[in-house]
Image (spheres, helix red, strand yellow):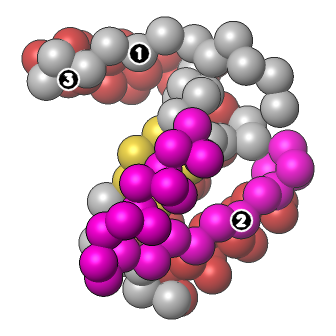
Amino acid sequence: MLKGITSSAAGTPGVVIKVSDAKGDPATQIDQLKTFVADKVDAIIIGPADGDLGLQISKLASDAGIPMVYVNNQPIRGRNKACSHRHAKAARSMNVHHRPAEISH
């Protein structure tokens, strides 16, 4: 997926892709996200290192007014099931289908 995004962006004038890999470490990923927020990027595509970080990740991006797209992992699960169901319902209404990731990190 990353290869497809970067190759597509390479042919699009004015598009710059910044890539970070937390290597599955949630604390590193939060630090990387904070850097992107400080850099005032236009959008963030993220594969959460831990789905339970979804609320924290979403708040950082939302507070900065940066749109975010989640891939490969549900952003919210477990004790936040009600919120997860709302997100799933909203995604279905936008014709977006979510399936849990089957790709290991």
Relative to residue 14, is residue 11 depicted above or below? above
- Per the image, the residue denoted by label 2 is 20
Q: Residues within 10 Å of mark 3 (few under 14, many from 20)?
A: few
Pick the front one: 47 or 12: 12
Q: Which of disc 1 and disc 3 is earlier in sequence?
A: 3
Instruction: Point out which mark residue 90 bears.
Output: 3
Pick the front one: 17 or 68: 17
The secondary element bearing badge 1 is classed as: loop
Q: Is residue 48 left or right of residue 74?
A: right
Is residue 59 visible in this depiction of the protein?
A: no
Amino acid on which the number 1 mark rests in the picture: His
Q: Which of disc 2 and disc 1 is earlier in sequence?
A: 2
Closer to viewer: mark 2 or mark 3:
2
Relative to residue 81, is residue 72 depicted above or below? below
Instruction: Point out which mark residue 98 bears.
Output: 1
Residues tagged 3 and 1 counted as in contact (Cβ below 8 A): no
* Part of the protein shown in magenta: 1-26
Pick the front one: 19 or 84: 19
Q: Residue at x 32, y 13 (%)?
A: 97
Amino acid on which the number 2 mark rests in the picture: Ser
The secondary element bearing badge 3 is classed as: helix
Asked if the stretch drawn in magenta spans residue 16, the answer is yes
Q: CA distance from mark 2 to mark 3?
A: 29 Å
Task: Give the residue at the far left of this rendering.
Answer: 93
Q: Residue at x 73, y 37 (%)?
A: 50
Asked if the stretch drawn in magenta spans residue 7, the answer is yes
Q: In the rendering, at what x and y percent does residue 62 appear?
A: 35, 63
Q: In the rendering, at what x and y percent does residue 24 appear?
A: 85, 44
Amino acid on which the number 3 mark rests in the picture: Ala
Q: Which of disc 3 and disc 2 is earlier in sequence?
A: 2
